[in-house]
Image (cartoon, grey):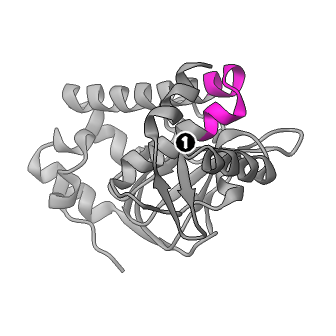
Amino acid sequence: MATCTATLLKNIPIFRQLAEQDLIDLARLANPKNLSEGEFLAMQGQSWPYFALVESGVIKTHKISSQGRCLGALRLQSGALFCSPTLLDEGSLPATLEADNDCCLFLWHGDVVLPYIKKNNQALWELSSLLVKRMRQASEMVEDLAFQPVASRVARLLLKQHQQSGADPMERNLTLDEMATMVGTTPVMVCKIMSQFSDRGYLKVSRTEIEFIDRDQLKKIIDNN
């Protein structure tokens, strides 16, 4: 089981503003949690007033509509801090948090962390900045779904994944189902669009890798819609 340390917390902008003794206290109060791939951390609709720091692995968030459609949202990588909206408004969690692979996290109930943050203006600012960032990410996703054709959304997702990986060819670390969830369509449609991109010479796609041949054409697909 991993151990939370003050040094680890200093890498997180919100916690970095706190005094050394506060960091030591929070490190001691952290609750480590290990999740296996596919295991749920929290479910959409429940009250979950926690801070969650991803120490290793990836946590994915997704939202289920009343019609049963699944829409992917954030992917929280190692070092990411998730602040549940329940911390501030006592409402329900808007999305499900699921381990995309084996993960190690540290959890704090809001009643533990918020007193430390409330007495530090800079930490409050960093918390507000993080929540605004999440709000903008959600707004961009809604805008894409409302106004961008599916091909444009797939192209944007591919380029974003390429930028994050920094590798070319890029390892295929998302399944067709996961990609479909993230862009609001079906796996069949994602497969069809990627085949079109390949046929046009924008990509080379294998079972394990994606090589980007003409990134400019993918950008044009996004810009023209």
SS for tag 1?
Answer: helix
On screen, residue 39 versus residue 7, left or right, reads right
Image quarter in which the N terminus is found = bottom left
Q: Which residue is mark 1?
A: 157
User: Is residue 46 among the parts visible in the rendering?
Assistant: no
Residue located at (75% from left, 49% from top): 192
Q: Left of 196 or right of it: where is 207? A: left
In percent of the image, x 38 and y 45: which residue is there? Answer: 163
Q: Quadrant of residue 146?
A: top right
Q: Quadrant of residue 167?
A: bottom left
Horizontally, residue 102 falls left or right of residue 44, namely left
Q: Which residues are magenta?
A: 142-154
Residue 147 placed where, x, y %? 68, 19
**Residue 127 lies in magenta, yes or no?**
no
Q: Position of residue 178 (x, y in %)?
A: 66, 55
For the residue pair 154 and 97, the one nearer the viewer reads as: 154
Q: Amino acid at mark 1?
A: Leu
